[in-house]
Image (spheres, helix red, strand yellow):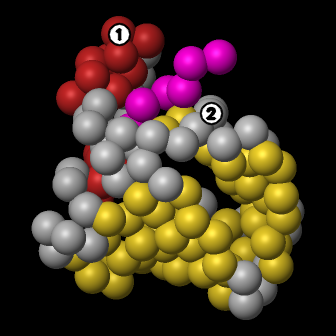
Amino acid sequence: MRLRLISLSPDLLEMEASYSGEGGMPPMHLHPSQSERFEVLSGTMETAIGGVARSYDAGSTFEVPPGTPHQMRASGPSRVRWEVRPALRTAEFFERMYTAPPSNAEEGAAFLGEFSEEFRLASS
């Protein structure tokens, strides 16, 4: 996945995500107090949101309410416009995750603890 920042304010983080379509689903996760809205610009996104699996094609939109376990992936090359409300520290989360990812389980646990208001693994 490649992310491009469109705008950032305390209330809203807007990004455009480009996916190659390779790889599986990320871990099931949730955002305790943030909502997400996605607009599929091209390609197809496969999602599992709140236990419901669904695919969205170009032109479709979908939302993830706060606290809802979810995961998604592209089923081929795809682009998505992505909004996160409120922004909190989500931009910093992604910047650090992709430029200096945790290198072991201990660092990973500390990283997730630091960003627990933005991202939590969902209980199985």
Q: Is residue 18 at all visible to an observer of this figure?
A: no
Residue at the spot 62% in from the left edge and 34% down from the top edge:
28
Indicate the quadrant containing the N terminus: top left, top right, bottom left or bottom right.
Answer: bottom right
User: What are the residue bounds of the magenta stretch?
Assistant: 119-124
Q: Secondary structure at mark 1?
A: helix
Residue 66 shown left or right of residue 113 in the figure: right
Quarter residue 114 falls in:
top left
Q: Is residue 116 depicted above or below 6 in this figure? A: above
SS category of the residue bearing label 2: loop
Q: Residue at x 77, y 85 (%)?
A: 58
Quickly name the residue at label 1: 106
**Amino acid type of disc 1?**
Glu
- The C terminus - image quarter: top right
Q: Position of residue 9 (x, y in %)?
A: 16, 74
Badge 2 local density, few (<14 within 10 Å), some, or many (20+)?
A: few
Q: Position of residue 81 (x, y in %)?
A: 53, 79
12 with respect to 122 (left or right): left
Q: Which residue is labeled 2 in the image?
A: 27
Q: Residues within 10 Å of mark 1 (few under 14, many from 20)?
A: few
Q: What separation in Å lies between label 2 and label 1 (alpha carbons)?
A: 18 Å
| Residue drawn at point x = 79 percent, y = 72 percent | 56
The three-letter code of the residue at mark 2 reads Pro
